[in-house]
Each structure stands twice: as C-alpha cells, then as structure tokens.
Amino acid sequence: GTPFFDAVILFAANINYDSANDVVYLHNNPNVQALLDESEVYIQPLRKKGIKVYLGLLGNHDAAGLAQLSDWGAHEWAQEVAEACKTYKLDGVNLDDEYSGAPDTNNPWFTYQSAASGARLAYEIKMALKEKCYWPTEVSVFEWGALYDLPAVTTDDGVTHTQSEFIDFTMANYGSASYPYGDLDYSNCSGASIQLNYGYTLYDTTINNIKNNEYGWVMWFAFDPSGTGGIQNNRAHSMN
C-alpha cells in the first residue's frame, strides 16, 4: 500500500550561459517545462502520495557548469534555482556535472572547475531553498565530473559548514554505489545504480551489501514501464 519509489528526479533542467547578456540562467527544455507548467497534473499528485520530486540540474555545452561558478556566481544562480522550486512546488534539486565547456575565469561568474566550487553551489542552493520554500527541501549529488568527495564549505564569515549541512544524499554511476565522505554516512548514499535500459538488476550480493551497510537509497535510471517509449525492452527490464 506504499509507493515503490521515494523520489523522482526530473531529468533535466540546465545551467546555461547567455554570453550576449553575460548572465548564467536556468533553462528548461520543452519536455521539462511542460511538466513544470502542469505541476498540478503531473507533480503534485506524486507529492501527495509521499513521493518527493526533485529538479535535475545539468550542464549544457557552454561556459556555465555546476562546479565552475565563482562564490558570487553560485550565490546568484542559486536564487533562481530556489525560486523555480518555490514556483513549481518541488522538493529540491539533483546536481549532475556533465556537458560543460571551459569557462573564462576572468569573468566574475566563473572559476576553475573543482569539487570545492561544486560544494559551494550545493551549499548556496541549500541555503536559498531554506529561505524561499516553507517546506523541507533537499540537495542531492550525482557523483560525476567534479562532484566527487565534496569538501566542507567555509563562507566569508569564517564559518565552516560540513557536508551534511548542504548534501542530503548522493548516487553513483551505473552499476556502482556511492560512498560517505565528510560527515555523511551510508544513509546519505545510494547502494546501487540500476540502468534499466541496459537490463541492470539487483543481485543478492548487492542487496545484502545495501542492507548490511544500511544504505539509504537505491537509484533507478530510465524507469519506463509503459512499453511505449523509445526502448521497448525497458518495460521488461522495469518489471523484472
């Protein structure tokens, strides 16, 4: 009588850079925007069942990236991201550092790609979400690109913020498990990442490892049991 899934990630909105106007902005492709525009039809019924809905954030082949914004740039873009979560009544975001170009580090928006910059953006988004949304919100991380083993964040006031203050859970690439770092523990991690297009499944050894280490999550990629999607065997893999 309870949902099989605890959460859904809408994959994906993009971090984009408008070079003509020198601004980093949140971009939604038509499919993502359609879901957001019909939030009451597609998203809020899931949330009412207790399933959290997160907005995926992904690079988009330009200078903007999730792990290469300056401290100021991270703060600025985080405000727009949090405002979108407030507008469409979402439960938070998932960061996926892929498909970004090299930034101009002389531009105040950008810095060199690093785990520290990715951690700073996660922190800024977490703080902006707390400020703008009156419901609990979360920030999750796909361990890819520079978003591995994110460090603690020391803000301009000299206060150091540990990972558990701005990261709620992590997941690894297909077939792998994420691992706790900083003051995170296994409850913040995904014990498996199952790519259903490829027919991945859960084996007894993986299940036992998840249970024994008390992992908090299992990540399922490309779930589509409809049988009408572009990859027909997805239904069989999903049902298995």
Image (spheres, rainbow, N blue to C red):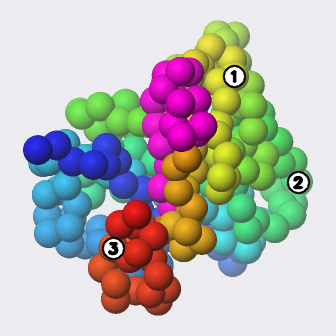
Q: Earlier in the sequence, mark 2 or mark 1?
A: 2
Q: Horizontally, is 153 left or right of 164 in the view?
A: right
Q: Position of residue 228 (x, y in %)?
A: 34, 88
| Count of numbered circles on the image | 3
Can residue 53 be seen from the camera position used here? Answer: yes
Disc 3, SS: loop
Where residue 181 is drawn, which disc sits there? Answer: 1
Which residue occupies the foreground of this view, 99 or 49?
A: 49
Magenta range: 204-221
Find disc 2 in the rendering and name its residue: 106
Q: Horizontally, is 131 left or right of 49 in the view?
A: right
Q: Position of residue 229 (x, y in %)?
A: 40, 86
User: Which amino acid is tagged 3?
Assistant: Pro
Q: Which residue is drawn at the image coordinates 60% and 71% (left, top)?
A: 198
Q: Position of residue 136 (x, y in %)?
A: 29, 31
Q: Nearer the viewer, mark 3 or mark 2?
A: 3
Which residue occupies the foreground of this view, 53 or 234?
A: 234
Q: Assign the N terminus to one quadrant of the image.
A: top left
Q: Position of residue 35 (x, y in %)?
A: 29, 72
Find disc 3 in the rendering and name its residue: 225
Residue situated furthest top in the rendering = 159
User: Which amino acid is tagged 1?
Assistant: Tyr
